Amino acid sequence: MEMTFSIIKPDGVRRNLVGSILGMMESAGLRIVTTKMIHMSRREAEQFYAVHKERPFFGELVEFMCSGPVVVSALEAPNAVVKYRELMGATDPKKADKGTIRAVHALSIGENTVHGSDSKENAAIELGFFFSGTELVNRAG
Ligand code: CMP
């Protein structure tokens, strides 16, 4: 069993898509180990996306991620990291495969509705950023 980390971004929460996106995760075989709605501060968004701080879109990304509430979740499945990345589709919704969360819901490369960890190592870091061990209440394995 493996865990990954997900964010339903402010554009998804704002458009009332939380239930349908969590449903897509469950239908794809990802177990919701825990989930909560939070409103990130600018400092938290800057820390979370620190790996991108030299990128030209960093300011816009931070601004967007603290523009409204988000839903953070821990998801569990065999190969959860890859499984969730496949379910999300490509970062740019124009390039995302049909039926993926971003193909169905994303508005643009910035407002792309969901974030998911890109490796097991980053999943552990990102889960630790938002959750304590005692919050991971619904593990199967
Ligand atoms: P995410 O998986 O959350 O990780 C970094 C985010 O930067 C990415 O999804 C995009 O939403 C966002 N972003 C904004 N502009 C760009 C861009 N030009 N190229 C790549 N990512 C971008």
Image (tube, rainbow, N blue to C red):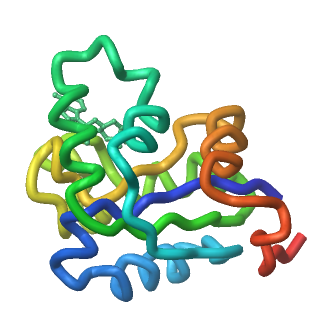
Q: Nearer the viewer, residue 9 or 46?
A: 46
Q: Which residue is drawn at 17% across and 60% down?
A: 106
Rendering quadrant holding ligand 1: top left
- The front one of 93 and 66 is 66
> Outermost residue, top direction?
54
- Residue located at (58% from left, 54% from top): 5
Side of 65 relative to 31 (left or right): left
> Can you tell which quarter of the image residue 109 is in?
top left
In the picture, measured across the screen, residue 88 lies left or right of residue 112, that is right
Rendered location of residue 90, percent (x, y):
29, 43
Q: Where is residue 43 in the image (x, y as percent from the top left)?
A: 40, 39
The correct choice, above or below, for 1 with respect to 36 in the image is above
Q: How many marks do you count on the picture?
A: 0
In the picture, residue 32 is in which quadrant? Answer: bottom right
Q: In which quarter of the image is residue 131?
A: bottom right
- Give above or below for 33 relative to 45: below
- Place of residue 116 in the rendered image (x, y in percent of width and height, measured from the top left): 47, 49
Is 2 on the left or on the right of 97, as rendered? Answer: right
Position above or below: 21 against 132:
below
Locate the C terminus and report the quarter of the image it occupies.
Answer: bottom right
Question: Would you say 75 lies left or right of 61 here?
Answer: right
Q: Residue at point 84% right, 76% down?
A: 140
Instruction: Work out which residue is located at the far right of the displayed protein and give it.
Output: 141
Q: Which residue is drawn at 76% across and 59% down?
A: 132
Q: For this rendering, which residue is in front, 83 or 3? A: 3
Q: In which quarter of the image is the N terminus?
A: bottom right
- Residue 124 locus on image (x, y percent): 72, 42
